[in-house]
Amino acid sequence: MLKLKWDNIALLVVDDNAFMRNLIVSTVRALGMTNVVAKSSATEAIEALKESRRNPVGAGFGTIDIILSDFVMEEVDGALFLRWIRTSKQAPDRFVPFLMVSGAADQQIVEAARDAGVSEFLAKPFSAKSMGDRILELIKNPRQYVLAPGYFGPDRRRLERPASWRLGEDYSSPERNRRVTGAEQIQVIHARSNIRTLREDVRAIYFRPANRLRDKLGPNALRGQIDFDPLVIQAAEERIHDMVGDYAVWVKNYLDTMGRSYKALERRDEDPKPHILTINQISHELRGQGGIFDYPLLTSFGKSLYQATLETRGEITDNRLKLIEAHIDALRVVFNKRVRGDGGKVGAELLKDIERAVAKYSEPPSAGAAS
């Protein structure tokens, strides 16, 4: 294997869940990327990046080469954070590669990240290999950046073929070709270009910057295939498994917190919204974490409970309480009995129980429901 200077690449990790943030940091460090800055919110990350531009010594870091961020965060979510990176005059580097790492990997979320200017998307649960693969993609196959009406970020086209979109948020209008810009209306700016002015007649500008990440890995990066040593990947996987004990503590805390919120909903003696929101946020975390530690049923039930609690307003009916209770009970069984993998007969029965509960107790969304 080529000797590469992985510690020359500086990463910023942003996740409001402490356990997941520590897991991502541990994983990239195990891959040899030890130059890591971690922040617990996008707001904190933005302030730190502003400070790094004014005063790198005071901020504790200078240039950031890759950002890894969660999508679902309070106050400022991953999409807004990414838009700030790509569009704000205060952002130190609008071209920085941005890897979104999120348990919310539904098509709508992925498309929102894409349209905000994401470089790569990694769904939770992840492995050390999948994390390494996404980082290698940023290094080996960097995309040109596109400035066009309403968008700045990596080229969203993976293939040279016509792309279609549906007009209108309801996706009911007929498809039309999204690309209406001809080659003569595009100006290309290369890293070593002497061009200092932009043509006024262009509709889009392609920026093709130098591969800074490859350069930072040292001269060996130019001599052959860039890859992580398989032994390093194995060590990173072992690091993840070493944290299983810590994860058990987190799951217990999650379940205890959800149990308290459920009891408060059952009493009906206070505003239900914060308790529904608590259950929704915890279920989102579980859907992203369970599979990492060989608890895919935690991921499945977490995703189902997340969908069941997206509506945070309105009356807490008996049916809704029973649906939440069924999910929490199933999650407790998985945790208490350490039901790993598909769980065999126990797992199959639990899945059937949840399917029956969803079919029996789900209610149609009320008017004006939160999406």
Image (cartoon, rainbow, N blue to C red):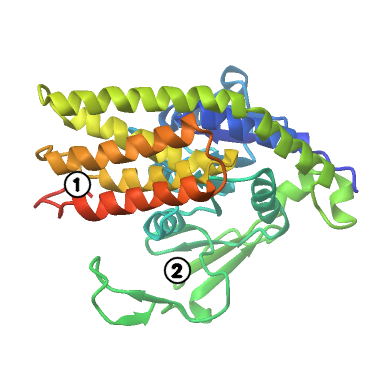
Which corner quadrant of the image does residue 52 belong to? top right
Identify residue for label 1: 370
Which is more toward the observer, 317 or 21? 317
User: Dot 2, crowdedness within 10 Å: few (<14), some or many (≥20)?
Assistant: few
**Residue 200's disc number:** 2
Instruction: Note whether residue 193 is visible.
Output: yes
* Residue plotted at (68% across, 36% down): 28
Residue nearest the viewer, comparing 84 with 183: 84
Q: Quadrant of residue 309?
A: top left
Q: Is residue 246 left or right of residue 41?
A: right
- Label 1 vs 2, first from the N-terminus: 2
* The label number, if any, that marks residue 195 in the structure image: none
- The residue that appears at 15% across and 55% down in the rendered structure is 364
**Residue 147 position (above or below residue 298):** below
Q: Position of residue 231 (x, y in %)?
A: 84, 42
Farthest residue, direction top: 58
Mark 1, other Cα within 10 Å: few <14 / some 14–19 / many ≥20: few
User: Can residue 229 be seen at all in this image of the molecule?
Assistant: no
Marks 1 and 2, how far apart at CA = 43 Å
Q: Which amino acid, by three-letter code, is at mark 2?
A: Glu
Q: Is residue 332 left or right of residue 275?
A: right
Amino acid type at mark 1: Ala
343 sits to left or right of 83: right
Residue 202, image x, y percentages: 46, 71
Residue 142, placed above or below residue 234: below
Left or right of 155: which side holds 264?
Answer: left
Q: Position of residue 304 (x, y in %)?
A: 35, 48
- In what element is the residue under mark 2? loop
Q: Residue at 41% x, 56% y: name it.
A: 106
